[in-house]
Amino acid sequence: MKITIFGATGNVGTRVINEALLRGHEITAVLRSNSRMSEFNPAVNLVIGNADNVEDVVKWSHGQDIVISATRPPQGEENKLVDTAKSLLSGLAQTKVRLLLVGGSASLTVPNSNSTLVVDDTDLVPTAWRDIALACLAQHKLCQENESVDWSYLSPPAVIIPGDRTGCFRTGTDELLVDEQGVSIISLEDFAIALLDEAESAKNSKKRFTVAY
Ligand SMILES: NC(=O)c1ccc[n+]([C@@H]2O[C@H](COP(=O)([O-])OP(=O)(O)OC[C@H]3O[C@@H](n4cnc5c(N)ncnc54)[C@H](OP(=O)(O)O)[C@@H]3O)[C@@H](O)[C@H]2O)c1
């Protein structure tokens, strides 16, 4: 598959590239500057662009099979995440390329809570994280309301950290997945497997899904 990645230098983006290369896909990584180009595998096609710029989204998605976006705005500018989602949806409505968006867990429901959203659970989302969680909520709503793009939205569990590539994890829909100890976690490496599985299968077209151990 021909895959364009926004957020390619990030925690999630770098693992997505590793996983996509392992599977033999053709990767175009969109970087905001050329300062980190030397870190990439030579097999990756490196281009300059910004997910907030609709013209860049159109340019770098044209002729591709899917765009995977895993961008994160700077602290204090959390609401930019919503502008980025608008730009991606607007550009991809023009090129008719699928969007696989790495979102947040904010809009999932807390298990056994009478449908409390993660964003409203102060144990899961302390005050310091509330702004990014609210931005993720708005980002998810934009996707739900969009009828022009073939989107899919992956909500991470509460925690994604570097770890092993096991391929063993559970998949859910709208509820935060927690293990027997109540922990909601996955490695970045397994999270990338979930993203590439979705890119290849398109199982969750126009849907949100989530993964965790
Ligand atoms: N539990 C949760 O809900 C949870 C947990 C973890 C992560 N997440 C979400 O997962 C996403 C990715 O997280 P991460 O940890 O991988 O982030 P990260 O390591 O901070 O990486 C962010 C990436 O986004 C890029 N970027 C930012 N704005 C961009 C733009 N406008 N256009 C193109 N690239 C842009 C950065 O590029 P530069 O190199 O140019 O800065 C960087 O590559 C975030 O949306 C985050 O909210 C959610």
Image (cartoon, rainbow, N blue to C red):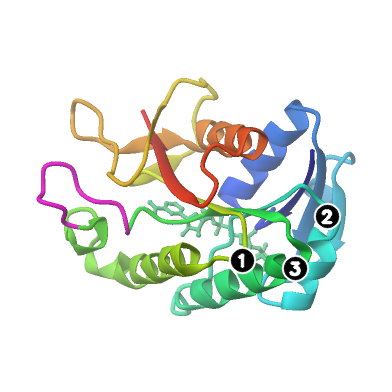
Above or below 61: residue 38: above
Q: Position of residue 160 (x, y in %)?
A: 43, 42
Q: Secondary structure at mark 3?
A: helix
Tell me if residue 154 can be seen: no
Q: Secondary structure at mark 1?
A: loop
Tell me if residue 118 can be seen: yes
Mark 3: amino acid: Val
Q: Residue furthest front?
A: 147
Task: Tell me which residue sits at (37%, 66%) in the image.
Answer: 137
The circle drawn on residue 37 is 2
Q: For mark 2, does the 10 Å Cα neighbourhood hold few (<14), some (14 to 19), or many (20 or more) residues?
A: some
Circle 1 is placed at which residue position? 148
Q: In screen coordinates, is 163 left or right of 157?
A: right
Circle 3 is placed at which residue position? 57
Mark 2: amino acid: Met
| Among the 4 quarters of the image, the one containing residue 122 | bottom left
Of badges 3 and 1, nearer the viewer stands 1
Q: Earlier in the sequence, mark 2 or mark 1?
A: 2
Magenta region: which residues?
107-116
Of badges 3 and 2, nearer the viewer stands 3
